[in-house]
Image: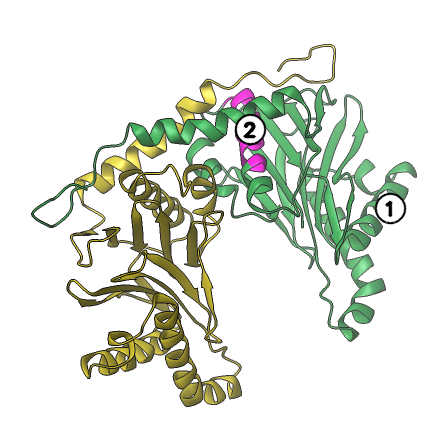
Chain colours: A yellow, B green
């Protein structure tokens, strides 16, 4: 399983992904964050979930086109770039879907793409296995793929497009990943974390946090304790009985 | 969708359930907590998820047997009581499974049962649609059915069999439900909440919290704000770059 998420705020983007991959009981490591940059002109960060074989093929084809000066290298807008990813997914679907479905395996690969092209605002898309894109919005400023539910309540509470700073968005992303890794052992470190400030048009803030990273540990420990502290401050629950408190 | 959970601690049990039920786009209310008591001798609290038609049938048959002095009224242990629930699920499976599967509907009903029989400790079981029971343990002191993932991280962090008081377990249960209701609109209030102190052998602490209940609102509001406060206390994330902080 994977867990990746992208956050869009008024200041820019945060992208984060776990690194665990499993095929049956075989568990290994795999970076799920892929970067395409033409400095000063365009920046794309792709996160992947689903079948590693499929997402690898998509990234391989995207990279080949990009290196040849096509595909993501020439997309006129971020919407067009999302469409480039979508049509590449469809090329891999043409290659592999039939053989997978014959063996009752689904064609499953999801992408999150954040980035910016000069002259546009930064933006964030989710691209489905069918190739169609979904854009993040002011009301729904984050997008998740993979094991999405455990890490969602903290984002629902914390992320506001208009008011959340990039620094805080990055912390919420780490907590969201930490919550997911704690509840689902097939999601695991290292965590790749990338913060992109609007207008940068290059990648300045990247971090690969191993399980042993002191700041990841500190955030984990802090977050283990803080719900307990917060619960202690809650008002008592009244019950419908003579002894109306426990 | 439903969300129900049971918690077992050294002091007793907490059981909680939402009340929303939907069939297609038809959404209505339905209590998912069912109580069977012989005062001073035995107490069972059942929570249900899955197809309302199926869980209703199971409860109807359980109630009929109980009122006739059989089934849950005579089970010698809580394990036997979980087996009574399981065999009743199998009776309903014999009645309905074939017709459902002919129309590609799954036979889906899950139960959580908490309770106590005089002479035993309180205990907590999950009973699967196949009728087999799973018991909560010291290491896994809570059991969930329905939409389980959104509300799980807070339980993983808060609930310890040996040290969590019933008062706190009840608060964690409410936060877990609140998180789930916030992220999945098909899970909704009123919330039924029952706290059972070991040895009571009767039900003293019940509460049905409507969406408008001031204490549910206060807990919701408090919990909206507390993650933000906690995030503000987190250490900064260091990045691998010249400007190593955002």
Q: Is residue B177 magenta?
A: yes
Task: Name the residue beneath numbered marker 2.
Answer: B220
Residue sitting at 46 percent across and 17 percent down? A233
Q: Residues within 10 Å of mark 1 (few under 14, many from 20)?
A: few
Chain bearing tag 2 is B
Chain bearing tag 1 is B
| Residue B158 seen in the figure | yes
Would residue B16 appear left or right of B231 to someone viewing this image? right
B212 above or below A203?
above
B55 above or below B160?
below
Would residue A75 appear left or right of A242 to someone viewing this image? left
Q: Name the one closer to the observer, B197 or A45.
A: A45
Would residue A192 appear left or right of B218 to someone viewing this image? left
Percent x, y for residue B78? 68, 38
Residue sitting at 44 percent across and 39 percent down? B156
Q: Name the one closer to the observer, A84 or B20.
A: A84
Percent x, y for residue B167? 55, 20
In the image as oriented, which residue stretches furthest toward the front? A119
| Residue B87 seen in the figure | no
User: Which of the 4 image quarters holds residue B7?
Assistant: top right
Q: Is residue B81 magenta?
A: no
Q: Quadrant of the N terminus of chain A?
A: bottom left
Q: Quadrant of the C terminus of chain A?
A: top right
Q: Name the one closer to the observer, A37 or A228.
A: A37
For the stretch drawn in magenta, the main secondary structure is helix
Q: Name the one closer to the observer, B26 or A180.
A: B26
The span picked out in magenta is B165-178
Would residue A215 appear left or right of A158 to someone viewing this image? left
> Label 2 to label 1, Cα distance in Å?
35 Å
Percent x, y for residue A77? 34, 68
Task: Name the residue beneath numbered marker 1.
Answer: B60
């Amino acid at each position: 399983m994977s867990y990746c998420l992208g956050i869009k705020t008024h200041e820019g983007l945060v992208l984060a992904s776990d690194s665990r991959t499993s095929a049956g009981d075989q568990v290994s490591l795999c970076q799920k964050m892929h970067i395409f940059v033409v400095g000063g002109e365009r920046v794309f960060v792709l996160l992947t979930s689903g079948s590693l074989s499929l997402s690898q093929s998509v990234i391989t084809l995207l990279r080949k086109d990009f290196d040849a000066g096509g595909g993501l290298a020439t997309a006129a807008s971020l919407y067009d770039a999302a469409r480039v990813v979508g049509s590449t997914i469809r090329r891999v679907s043409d290659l592999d879907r039939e053989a997978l479905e014959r063996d009752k395996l689904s064609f499953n690969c999801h992408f999150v793409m954040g980035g910016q092209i000069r002259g546009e605002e930064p933006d964030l898309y989710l691209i489905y296995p069918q190739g169609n894109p979904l854009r993040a919005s002011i009301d729904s400023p984050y997008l998740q793929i993979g094991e999405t539910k455990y890490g969602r309540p903290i984002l629902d509470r914390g992320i506001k497009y208009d008011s959340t700073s990039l620094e805080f968005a990055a912390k919420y992303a780490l907590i969201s990943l930490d919550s997911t890794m704690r509840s689902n052992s097939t999601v695991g470190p290292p965590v790749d974390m990338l913060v992109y400030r609007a207008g940068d048009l290059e990648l300045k803030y990247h971090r690969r946090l191993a399980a042993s990273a002191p700041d990841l540990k500190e955030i984990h420990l802090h977050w283990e304790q803080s719900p307990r502290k917060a619960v202690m401050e809650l008002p008592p629950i009244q019950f419908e009985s003579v002894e109306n408190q426990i």
